Image: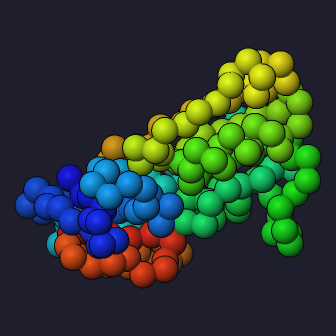
Amino acid sequence: MITLGYDGTLEGELAAGVRAYLDAEWVGGAPGAELPAILVQDEAESVRADARAYAAWEALAAGLTRPVEGLAPVDVLGAGLLAALVRERVAPPRLGRPTDPGGVVDTTGDPEQIVAATGRVVSGGVVVLGGETLGRALEINLYKDVHVRGLRVVGVPRPESAIAEPAGGPVTAPVPIAPGDTPPLAPWYVFGA
């Protein structure tokens, strides 16, 4: 289990031979909260382990984009690797956030951003939840914020482990972090490398 320390450092231990991959959006939250990760049995070659984890992120991104296929524009919330992979699939690069999006994909898990997304998406639109709340409570009025506007809210769970046989490798390597480290600004991390 990996947790966020009160000083912003990561703490925890993994089973022998296991690496944990974390998205940048998933290393925040309340101190002491368990941080979600994609676990990979360590391999002799770290590049192969990284590729297996990256393939799991790509599979999750594909799952997050299915509910918004054919909608335009789509707003993607987040700054980590998962958000970048979703953006590659749903929209050409543009400056700023789209107005009146037909769909919103949240990779942050931030309750405030999720509630705001239900207000920004057009009536009849889709909000896809792919982030981790990290123990933060979410207060939403399902009747007013979702039902009356005819929104569809879709949750997509993260994979618990990596893809067995990845097709390729990561575009950017994960930043290694160890117990006691404060994560630097990066799209994704590997803990226990």
The spot of residue 80 in percent (x, y) is 55, 66
Which residue is nearer to you in this view: 115 or 39?
A: 115
Which residue is nearer to you in this view: 179 or 102?
A: 179
Q: Residue at x 48, y 55 (%)?
A: 57
The spot of residue 134 in percent (x, y) is 41, 48
Q: In the visual, does 44 lie left or right of 171? A: left
Q: Residue at x 83, y 19 (%)?
A: 148
One can see residue 165 in this view = no
One can see residue 51 in this view = yes
Q: In the visual, does 50 lie left or right of 156? A: left
Q: Give the image quarter of residue 184.
A: bottom left
Q: Is residue 29 above or below residue 137?
A: below
The spot of residue 6 in percent (x, y) is 29, 66
Placement of the C terminus among the 4 image quadrants: bottom left
Q: In the visual, does 16 lie left or right of 130? A: left
Q: In the visual, does 130 lie left or right of 96? A: left
The spot of residue 9 in percent (x, y) is 29, 72
Q: Is residue 191 above or below residue 159?
A: below
Q: Residue at x 70, y 62 (%)?
A: 88
Q: Residue at x 80, y 58 (%)?
A: 91
Residue lying at the far left of the rendered structure: 16
Way the structure is coloured: rainbow
